[in-house]
Image: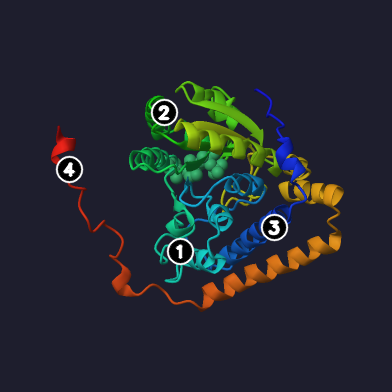
Amino acid sequence: MAKAKKESDSAVLDAACAPEWTEILKQMIFIRRFEEATEREFRKGKIGGYLHVYIGQEAVASGIVGALQKGDAVFCGYRDHAQALSLGSDPNRVMAELFGKGTGVSKGKGGSMHLFDVEHGLYGGYGIVGGHLTLAAGAAYAKRYQGSDSVVVCYFGDGAMNIGSFHEAMNMAGLWGHQGMCPIVFVIENNGYAMGTSVERHSALTDLAARVRAYDIAGEKVDGQDIFAVRGVADRVVRQVRETGKPYCIEAVTYRFSGHGAADILQPYRTKEEVEQHRHRDPINILRKRLGEVCGLTDDDVKAMDEWAIERAANAVKFAEESSQPAPDELFADVVAEHGPRPVSEDERE
Ligand SMILES: Cc1ncc(C[n+]2csc(CCOP(=O)(O)OP(=O)(O)O)c2C)c(N)n1
């Protein structure tokens, strides 16, 4: 397996003491506290259906999002709370969605796996493994076709690479990329497992970025626990994809500290020691330590951030609890598009 590139682009490190990075740390701590709160609420029976948290993987979403600009679009799988929060979705409305309430970002009809917030660039939240890859590639093509310079980011897990739509999406993206018509960054969130099946057991080739190269899409690995490395790669790659309209793939090597979903308590497919080993590379501690060493961030500073995060997550739970169920007449709203296909002009017909 090719080694993850330890890329801390010097420009990123030079700017490490910019206030932006303390904000990013605060955001990552908040995502962690938010996810812990969702796990607690799930166990109390307040959140129904499925729940997949992002604990341990925070540096990936938080590192990529910093490279995006307004108008860019993000597609992801069902492990989507952090994607929404890092894009700036209102945490109260994200939590309300998990509770199935009408104030939720998908009006309570999507739940944990189907968060949508187009205003903030989130085009879903999809529960079907790999199903969103073709949608994301099509959206990237559409953006370029409409003359926009926006970029699409599509996150997916290592397990999604064994699904047919992965291959369809990569092939079309590779082909459209030849014409500079597919500005998409595919981000493999390689957390080592697809449910209880390790990458070594589910993928004949474990160098996942190399599998994407088979479709003439360039790619590279990055240490997904080091946000400076992720951001360094993301800044460069997003700029390049925006300029060229050619797809690119980033394999972020990361690890999930919680079970696959909230119901995965025993985790018989891995040992406690393995999880402990990975906890030494907690992405929040890596950033916190770096800001302490380089910029003088103190334990008190971090404590204050943590208290703020805990309170904000608790407020989100309170908001969700106090919100109403969706109104019955909402049942059929937003289910089928109201407008038909775009009429094709005479010129286009020729
Ligand atoms: C088409 C399809 N097949 C099977 C499932 C059941 N399933 C849910 S999550 C999952 C594993 C996916 O793993 P990965 O893509 O690595 O993402 P991760 O959960 O690690 O983030 C499977 C097989 C599904 N949701 N959709």
Residue type beneath disc 1: Val
Q: Which residue is mark 1?
A: 105
- CA gap between label 2 and label 3 equals 35 Å
Mark 1 element type: loop
- CA gap between label 4 and label 1 equals 33 Å
Residue type beneath disc 2: Gly
Residue 333, how many percent across, how many down? Answer: 29, 65
Mark 2 element type: helix
Mark 3 element type: helix
Residue type beneath disc 3: Glu
Q: Which residue is mark 3?
A: 23
Residue 133, how many percent across, how many down? Answer: 42, 39
Q: Which mark is drawn over residue 177?
A: 2
The residue carrying mark 2 has its beta carbon less than 8 Å from ligand 1? no
- CA gap between label 4 and label 2 equals 24 Å
User: Which of the two discs, 1 and 2, labels the residue nearer the N terminus?
Assistant: 1
Horizontally, residue 273 falls left or right of residue 160, namely right
> Within 10 Å of the Cα at label 3, are there few (<14), some (14-19), or many (20+) other Cα atoms?
few
Q: Which mark is drawn over residue 344?
A: 4
